Amino acid sequence: MQFTINDRPVEVEVDLRTSLLDLLRENLGLTGSKKGCNQGACGACTVLVEGERINSCLALAVQYQGRSITTVEGLSDAEGLHPLQRAFIEHDGFQCGYCTPGQLCSAVAMADEMARGIPSHVTGDLTAETIALDHDELRERMSGNLCRCGAYNGIVAAIAETYASAPARQEEAA
Amino acid sequence: MTPFSYARADDVPGAIALAVATPDAKYLGGGTNLVDLMRETIERPAALVDVTGLSREITVGADGGVVIGAGVTNTALAADRTIRTHYPMLSRAILAGASAQIRNVATVGGNLLQRTRCGYFYDDAARCNKREPGAGCDAIDGFNRIHAILGASPSCVATHPSDMCVALAALDAQVRVAGPDGERTIALVDLHRLPGGSPERDTVLDPGELVVAVELPALPFAAHSTYRKVRDRASYAFALISVAAGIELENGAIKDVRIALGGVAHKPWRAFKAEAALRGQAPSEANVRAAAELELADAAGLRDNGFKIELAKRAIVATLAELSGEQA
Ligand SMILES: Cc1cc2nc3c(=O)[nH]c(=O)nc-3n(C[C@H](O)[C@H](O)[C@H](O)COP(=O)(O)OP(=O)(O)OC[C@H]3O[C@@H](n4cnc5c(N)ncnc54)[C@H](O)[C@@H]3O)c2cc1C
Ligand code: SF4
Ligand code: FES
Ligand code: FES
């Protein structure tokens, strides 16, 4: 099977039953993406496929042959950490860090969804041309990523600082 | 997982040919439900026919109706401008379900045909007629808080978990399918079955039948519609009860109305009785409550889910109050 992973071409032979998450972790040694629940319920395995976030545990690797996949390892570049990664450090956006790779990938794609005007469950006016990333929008849009340590205050603050059009109200986060 | 073969279909006839060629083949959409069930060996297809490359378009007809390809993702459908403007209950129903990660991958076809979330269905060690016909049903006397209050049978009390389907039921959607014996169109409200004595069959589809598209008839007043979902947490949880509703008022009376319920039955539940009772009536709380009582008259609770009967009635009242308040 062939893929482009973090901008590099990869060719690998694996059993058809291999999930995309196991391919990354077990076959390619990219252990940044985490296996929390292995059933779509936690978001720790979130990766980007052509920039869109998906749960790699619910995907067979074979479904994504030929596609371009970005993992947390691919977020930083020669210039150093991604701005969102720096914000996570600054705002204590993690405790044990297990959910962090998924949170980071998820938030990067979320910002792109905002830019494309994709609505969410809490969007008041579905016909609006643009949607502001306020506190409620941010929390709803990140609800596919759980944090067992409950580092949500820091996570929300870091994402808000990096992407929000309106400052998040930190005291309500949790 | 048990071993399987994998092939990508290029077109509808090709997909059907591939599916018919191997016994126990299954179509694969985004895989967000099927891959999970295969890992648990609840589903053991011998072949997967990936149909995500087919029918990815949303087309608006001259009459205002919309044809949605089965391969359209949940995110793309919810974000579509026509759907947001003319069928907001559908956008809202989809956005109330799962997470962004899952909606990005999940397809319309897969959402229609996703399996129940009954915990015993997922648990190999439990008895489940849906998984193993004749085995018995551990949910009937077990943990059944999320189970059905309408249309259940002594064989199975599971619910259909989709939010999207509840809106489609309210919108009179039609499902276009193709199979070895040709094409046919099935009303969405007739696609899913009540369990009766054969809960192993979720739908009326025959083996090898492929969902090709979903058609929404033009329904101008659906521009004034919404979806309300009641669940255990504010996001990322299946519905305990949900209501998709649209209403058209004229001279202070209900000219037309659509109501469907989720979380109550083995299929998305179109509230035909409540709708009939409400046409021509004022949208008062008393009238809506009476209609809801009528719809839920046959509802039956199990050990843990009796609260859903009253919850469903209140959710109908609240949803219609919201809609008629906006329109007044
Ligand atoms: C953690 C979690 C939370 C969720 N929460 C919600 C929720 O709140 N509300 C909700 O509605 N859903 C929820 N879902 C379910 C989700 O919506 C479904 O998994 C998804 O819609 C399935 O789509 P898919 O394309 O991935 O289907 P797949 O997993 O690919 O397929 C599902 C079934 O459909 C069949 N199939 C697929 N496409 C076709 C076709 N074109 N023709 C014939 N058969 C086909 C497959 O053979 C399979 O049996 C949740 C899922 C998870 C994992
Ligand atoms: S309710 Fe249906 S799905 Fe659940 S255990 Fe009983 S038979 Fe199986
Ligand atoms: S490991 Fe994939 S969602 Fe939890
Ligand atoms: S930091 Fe520990 S799970 Fe989120």
Image: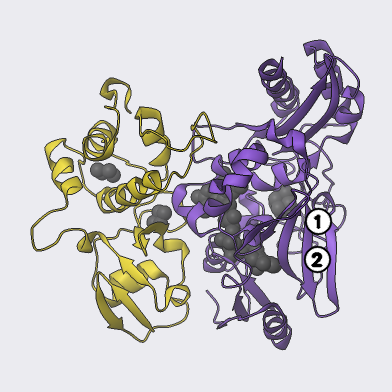
Chain colours: A yellow, B purple
Name the residue beneath numbered marker 2.
Answer: B205
Q: Quadrant of residue B197?
A: bottom right
What amino acid is labelled 2 in the image? Leu
Residue B162 visible somewhere in the drawing: no
Chain hosting mark 1? B
> Dot 1, crowdedness within 10 Å: few (<14), some or many (≥20)?
some
Where residue B250 sits: x, y (%)?
83, 20
Q: Which mark is residue B40?
A: none
Q: Quadrant of residue A51?
A: bottom left
Where residue B73 sits: x, y (%)?
56, 58
How far separated are the C-alphas under marks 1 and 2?
7 Å
Q: Residue at x 89, y 17 (%)?
A: B281
Residue A159 visible somewhere in the drawing: yes
Asked if the residue under mark 2 is in contact with the one under mark 1, i.e. CB atoms within 8 Å, the reply is yes
> Dot 2, crowdedness within 10 Å: few (<14), some or many (≥20)?
some
Q: Which mark is residue B191?
A: 1
* Of residues A128 and A16, the one drawn nearer to the viewer in this rendering: A128
Q: Secondary structure at mark 1?
A: helix
Q: Earlier in the sequence, mark 1 or mark 2?
A: 1
Q: Is mark 2 within 8 Å of ligand 1?
A: yes
Where residue A86 sits: x, y (%)?
13, 45
